[in-house]
Amino acid sequence: QRMNSIGFIWDPLEHAWNEQFDQLCAFKAHNGHCNVSKNDAQNRSLGQWVYQQRQLYKKNTLSSDRIQQLNSIGFIWDHLDHAWKEKFNQLCAFKAQYGLSNVHQNNEQNK
């Protein structure tokens, strides 16, 4: 109890993970997404952490609690697959509206 009263951190790894998760939540609140690049100069540490979570998920070594926490904020596990699906959905919408799927790269709808 005395240790708790002075803010003693019992599990530094868990504490560090929660700190990064909180930073990711703040990033999402500001940017509208959780896709932090590991090359982002302003968020390099957070980007590396996001990358690491994706790698741990792929290796099936990320705990279900952490997966659930990340899912709860809309974390994208495979950002390349997600980007492809977004573009495909845009193409489907374009085809539904214009009846064709051959979009010219200079088309205003393509920007």
Image: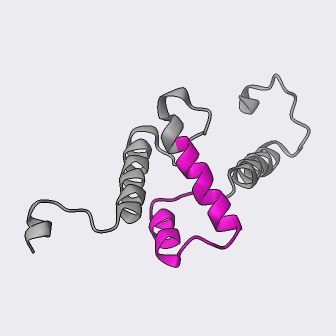
Q: Can residue 85 be spotted in the picture?
A: yes
Q: Quadrant of residue 76?
A: bottom right
Compared with residue 35, is residue 5 higher up or lower down, i.e. above or below?
below
Compared with residue 110, is residue 66 higher up or lower down, i.e. above or below?
below
Compared with residue 29, is residue 65 higher up or lower down, i.e. above or below?
below
Q: Quadrant of residue 4?
A: bottom left
Left or right of 73 in this view: 15:
left
Which of 4/66 is in front? Answer: 4
Q: Quadrant of residue 17?
A: bottom left
Q: Position of residue 32 (x, y in %)?
A: 47, 44
Which quarter shows the N terminus? bottom left
Residue for point 39% across, 65% down: 14
Residue for point 74% across, 49% down: 80
Indicate the colouring scheme: one colour
Q: Position of residue 58 (x, y in %)?
A: 70, 66
Left or right of 11 in this view: 97:
right
Residues drawn in magenta? 47-76
Which quarter shows the C terminus? top right
Q: Main secondary structure of the magenta part?
A: helix
Which of 9/70 is in front? Answer: 9
Looking at the image, how many numbered discs can be counted on the residues?
0
Which of 102/24 is in front? Answer: 24
Q: Look at the image and say whether residue 70 sits in the magenta stretch.
A: yes
Left or right of 6 in this view: 35:
right
Q: Position of residue 15 (x, y in %)?
A: 34, 60
Left or right of 1 in this view: 48:
right
Q: Look at the image and say whether residue 32 sits in the magenta stretch.
A: no
Q: Position of residue 33 (x, y in %)?
A: 51, 46
Residue for point 53% across, 70% down: 67
